[in-house]
Image (cartoon, rainbow, N blue to C red):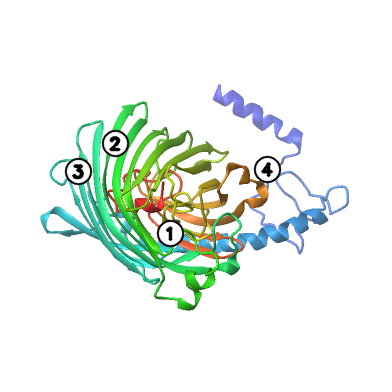
Amino acid sequence: MTRIFLTTVMMMLPMIGWTQPDLGQPVSAGADTILANPSRWGEMPARSDSNMAHFSYQPRSGWETAALVPYNILGIPFRILDVAGRESIKALDRWGIFDMPPSEHVGLPLPFGTYLLPDVAISGLEGLSYGINVRRPDFLGAGNMAFLMVSSSTKHADKLSGGLYFNLTETWGLQLGAGTSELPLTKFYGLGYGSTEGDESFYNRISQWFGAEVNRDLGRRISVELRSYYSLVEARESGFEVDRGLGVIHADDLPFGFPGESSGWTFRIGLIRDATSETGRAQNRGFQKASVGWFQSTDNSDLSYLQYALDAQHFFPLWFTKRTLGLRAFMNRLENLGTSEIPLTRMATMYHPNNIRGFSDLRFYGMGSFGLSAEYRWPLWVAKGRDAMGLDSYIFSDMGQVYDHTDEIAFNHLNYTGGFGVRLINGEGKFVGRFELGFSDEETVITLTFSQNFQHHGRSLLYGKDPTRRP
């Protein structure tokens, strides 16, 4: 069969103009071999309009050229970030960092099974924070944790906090936490959504707290939390920026509770549903949380109020691998039950994770807060494979406001911000940290932190998060 096929092909070749070249007679190429040279398909004709294709450059239309100008300008920081990130990661890869086996626990090993880590963060409120934290995994039992942290900052903010977590059963967990914090350069612009940049002032905010929280897994990705903690918060004049002190700038309209202190107990119950598969590169599903808290003062004031908090998040997979759109909405509300006014230090405010990036934390004060966020994420680099440790880029837009009455919530009262950043994801798909730039009409906020606004960590008492700054 093969011989018949080859014979048939050889008989058909002369019919289509193919001739066997004389390999014994070398052919010298002319100046232009295309003009008239023999080939395996016969003699090639000279160039003419009938056998030559002409390609001409088609200019872009005016609208396309105009659209590319802002596109290229806005893309400059992303391209710089992309090149810097890729080159840094390539250098680490050449050093063999990513070939090292993962350690069971992160940090410098110390005696008694503890691990030490540097604690570094950047925020608009505290500036550059630096310190250390010490962790003791499996403290008095498997799955438990002991944590201690001390830090200071370039804006003179000091903090000492610690906590314990006990894994009681498969469904029960217990957190204990305590700490003290001082923010000598807390900004105050006035109360309500209408406070302006020109009224910027500073005061010293001091807080101490201790408390406990019980967590219960109810199944179907639903859990409940019960929290009780005591807190004392004081507002007084700052020893820094004295010419811009709150008492100087707002002497004719001092907020209630300044100067002064407030102490009391807070009791809160919250219901959480977390259907997301991971914290690093969540692709679908959502996260919802609702809580209600009650505060009762222990000082001489008749201060008592309820605090309601709602948080809804959802992630949408987009048309490329690991591209995600995250949407979030949150709302907080205080309802005064006593005869005393709510002091400045207890009012609803914008603080991580319920903040609008592009403004420093504690920028706004009111009886409630409201915010919307959108975040588009895409992979920037991965070490080994699609789901390995790597960097993700993201751009975001936030909007929100504080209010005293819900009818004050309006488009012309909202504050709008935007920005971009990079997220570090570990090999298990968990979020590690982020670096971002947030822009508003007042300031540019640089943030380096190991927590996120979406899917924020639930063990806040354990890790020393100040409960008086957040709902």
Estimate the x, y position of residue 168 in percent, counting from the top left. Answer: 19, 35
* Residue lying at 56% horizontally and 59% vertically, measured from the top left: 78
Q: Amino acid at mark 3?
A: Asn
Tell me the number on the disc at residue 20: 4
Residue at the spot of label 1: 257
| Residues at marks 3 and 2, CA–CA distance in whole angstroms | 14 Å
Residue at the spot of label 2: 215
| Residues at marks 4 and 2, CA–CA distance in whole angstroms | 86 Å
* Sequence-first tag of 1 and 3: 3
Q: State the image quarter where residue 19 is shown.
A: top right
Query: What is the secondary structure assignment of the residue under circle 3?
Result: loop
Nearest to viewer (mark 1 / mark 3)? 1
Who is closer to the viewer here, 226 or 359?
A: 226
Q: State the image quarter where residue 343 is shown.
A: bottom left
| Residues at marks 2 and 1, CA–CA distance in whole angstroms | 34 Å
Q: Relative to residue 330, is residue 242 depicted above or below?
A: below
| Residues at marks 4 and 3, CA–CA distance in whole angstroms | 84 Å
* Sequence-first tag of 1 and 4: 4
* Residue lying at 53% horizontally and 71% vertically, measured from the top left: 249
**Mark 4–mark 3 contact, CB under 8 Å?**
no
Estimate the x, y position of residue 408 in percent, counting from the top left. Answer: 62, 46
Nearest to viewer (mark 4 / mark 2)? 2
| Residues at marks 1 and 4, CA–CA distance in whole angstroms | 103 Å
| Residues at marks 1 and 3, CA–CA distance in whole angstroms | 40 Å
10 Å crowding of disc 2: few (<14), some (14-19), many (20+): many
| Left/right of residue 42 with respect to residue 212 in the rendered view | right
Residue 409 in sight here: no
* Residue lying at 30% horizontally and 31% vertically, measured from the top left: 217
Q: Amino acid at mark 2?
A: Asn
* Sequence-first tag of 2 and 1: 2
Query: What is the secondary structure assignment of the residue under circle 4?
Result: loop
